Amino acid sequence: MWFQEKKYAWYLLGALWLIALISTIPRFVMAFYQGQIAEDLDSSRGFISFAWSLNLLITAACLPVGGWLVDRFGPKRILLAGRIVGVIAAAVTYFSAEHAFYFLLGYGVLFGLTGISATTEFSLLFHWFKHKRGTANTILRSASPLGLALISPIFVANRDWLSWSDAFLLTSVLGLVLSLPLIQLVVKDPTSEPAKAAGDTRRKTVKEFIAEWKGTVSSPIMLAVVMALFVCGFNMGTVEMSLVAIHDHAHVPVETIGVALSLLGLMDVAGSLFFGVLLDRYSRTKILAVLYVLRTIGFLLLLLSLPVSPMVFSILFGATYVGVVPGSLLVASEWKKESGAQTGSLLLLHSLGGIAGSLLGGVTFDLTGDYRLLIGLNLGLCVLTAGLFLFGAMAGRHTAKQEVAKTSH
């Protein structure tokens, strides 16, 4: 036993972390090479943005489907299938220098289809970790920001001979020689919930599915979870697509923007570890309320555009960047029995929020000439979500007292 968990659980976390790290390379490419990709493909940046949006839409559509597949066939098979598609997608995108169609097919379509395996990590960690679920999930989520921090200096320092197509080739090779063997050798399906039994269950009708979701949002805690995941996606979509533009519009010096973005990445990692421990030790609903209070302060400072705003926003948002998704999914699994389908549906809300936040950045700027409306929307949504978690925590405590009173009579 290591830290109250079986040794295998930590081996599994290490394998999943490496797989997630490899999966961050395409994200790095899109963040740093958009202009170069458009030039090399002799296309517009609008075409690159369309491929990115198509990727998000297909990923979002695959989430609930992937969750159902996990329940039916087990997370190991679906994770393996998703990574195989990822290897093929990276290879196809590598050859897109020959024709823009291959970029759309590889990055826009095939990488989007890897969304079928997005729920597998949570299903595996939820089963194998009993006491440190919050810590495990936030450590896994730290792979993405840490990956960007590790990969970026390598490509920036060697930009003369390392190109975006090299990055996709590296993704394909690492997926083939590391990700697929790790899944095959390390990952084990949950033993207490065999895939065969899950496959024998009757599929829900649309009417039953709608009724189930009505029951879900009627619970104050689950309503807070649903809102938190959508708002988290909206916040992330805003930050990833518009933060540099927001700072630039506020006339923040380029050097300050660079330092702020580096600080954001460092706080991603530090915050994931810190809030992971808190999620295992204290009330998760209260911790999530605190996360959204911190985000509220961050967006308020961004709206006020003070000299300290870029740095303080990076500290506050970076610290809370990773904790919301695993924390919300853990709260949902406590209130309703965890399943791949449930996790997929909840992550779909996060993806839809990300799409909305990304697209509204350009729309609101075109309408108003600045980003204050977009920042204000993020601010209001964070206030609402923090309030819902506080209300849900109080409602849950009141219900618990009523249950205790009933059993005492």
Image: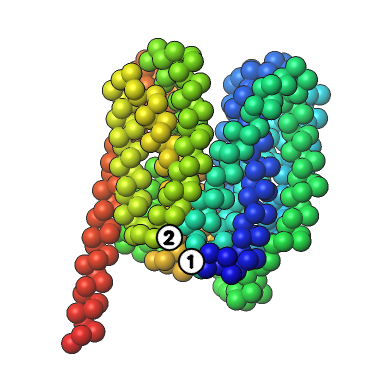
Q: Residue at x 31, y 62 (%)?
A: 219
The reply to whether residue 199 is in sight is: no
Instruction: Give the camera-side residue of 164 and 143.
Output: 143
Vertical comparison of 284 with 175: above or below? below
Residue 379 position in % (x across, y down): 31, 34
> Mark 1 — residue?
131
Quadrant, the C terminus: bottom left
Please tell me in which quadrant of the rendered image residue 35 appears: top right
Residue 216 position in % (x across, y down): 37, 61
Using residue 311 as the reference point, say whether residue 106 is left or right of it.
right
Please tell me in which quadrant of the rendered image residue 34 appears: top right
The reply to whether residue 16 is in sight is: yes
Point out the tag, 1 or 2, that comes first from the N-terminus: 1
Q: Residue at x 65, y 66 (%)?
A: 8
> Mark 2 — residue?
280
Instruction: Give the camera-side residue of 151 and 31.
Output: 151
Please tell me in which quadrant of the rendered image residue 54 appears: top right
Label 1 SS: loop
Instruction: Give the camera-side residue of 310 and 106.
Output: 310
Q: Amino acid at mark 1?
A: His
Cβ–Cβ below 8 Å for labels 1 and 2? yes
